[in-house]
Image (cartoon, helix red, strand yellow):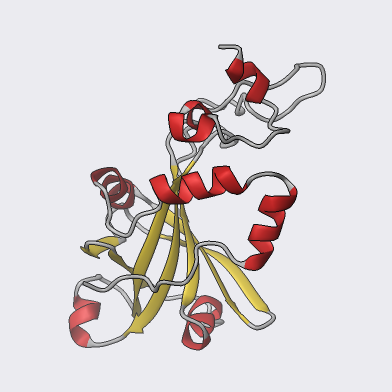
Amino acid sequence: MEVFDDRPFFHDGMRALQDEMDGRRTAEAIEAKRKHHVFSDADRQMIAEAPCVFIASAWQDYVDCSMKSGDPGFIQVVGPGILEYPEYDGNSMYRTLGNIRQNPNIGMLFVKFDGRSLRMRINGQATILQDAESLSRHHGARFVVRVVCEIYPNCPRYVPDFVQGKPSPYPPREGQGTPPPPEWKKRDYIRDGLPKADPHRKMLDEE
């Protein structure tokens, strides 16, 4: 089975900030409990239903963020931790594909703007395919991008609910006090290790 490489989940810059803000315990708990390399049933459902995905790519000083769209199902899970998506006819700039040609490391974000569904973040290693067999799996594709994935779900608390036209209740707002704690902070493996300055630590300790 193809798997993402064994590089650390956090680099030195991330670690430095975690230590400055007393966040290392929380970060390591999230890595240990939430990061995975095989799609869960919930992951597969989110991918199957997605009409779009946000993709970040970079090479040296060239950084790009794009959104790939299609009918739900245009992104396909083709292995335990591998997905493919088609590149359709575009504007001939090839910013995403050009970056991937130089640097296979990409970031992907699946998000439902309903204010409650977990986001799914992916660190991926991408390969560009243009052989007939790969193209035949994706109607209308000019290229196919195959991604070996490192997967971690992410809290949706700041995501607005576009379905009902409601803002998220979680952003800090003047005159409204401390927003409610998100569900994940109440979990046993997170709760006792929250940073000392976490705005919800005292609130959760009093529950």
Kindly indicate the quadrant of the structure image that contains residue 137: bottom left
Q: In the rendered view, does 162 fall on the left or right side of 171?
A: left
Query: Quadrant location of residue 204?
Result: top right
Q: Nearer the viewer, residue 52 or 57?
A: 57
Residue 162 visible in the current orientation = no
Q: Is 203 placed above or below 86 here? A: above
Residue located farthest toward the top when viewing the structure as drawn: 207
Observer-nearest of 134 and 77 = 77
Q: Position of residue 36 (x, y in %)?
A: 35, 55
What residue appears at the point 61 percent right and 12 percent down from the top-left corner?
206
Question: Residue at the spot x=25%, y=70% of the render?
Answer: 138
The answer to whether residue 83 is left or right of residue 151 is left
Please tell me how many numbered marks the rendered image carries. 0
Residue 190 position within the rendered picture, expressed as x and y whole percent measured from the top left = 50, 35
Q: Which quarter of the image is occupied by the C terminus?
A: top right
Which residue appears farthest toward the right when viewing the image? 174
For image coordinates 65% across by 25% down, the residue present is 200
User: Which of the pair 141/65 is nearer the observer?
Assistant: 65
Residue at left offset 49%, top offset 32%? 184
Residue 95 visible (yes or no):
yes
In this view, the residue in front, 49 or 90, is 49
Q: Position of residue 113 (x, y in %)?
A: 49, 38
| 182 is higher (above) or lower (below) than 13 | above
x%, y% of residue 114?
47, 33
On-image quarter of the N terminus: bottom left
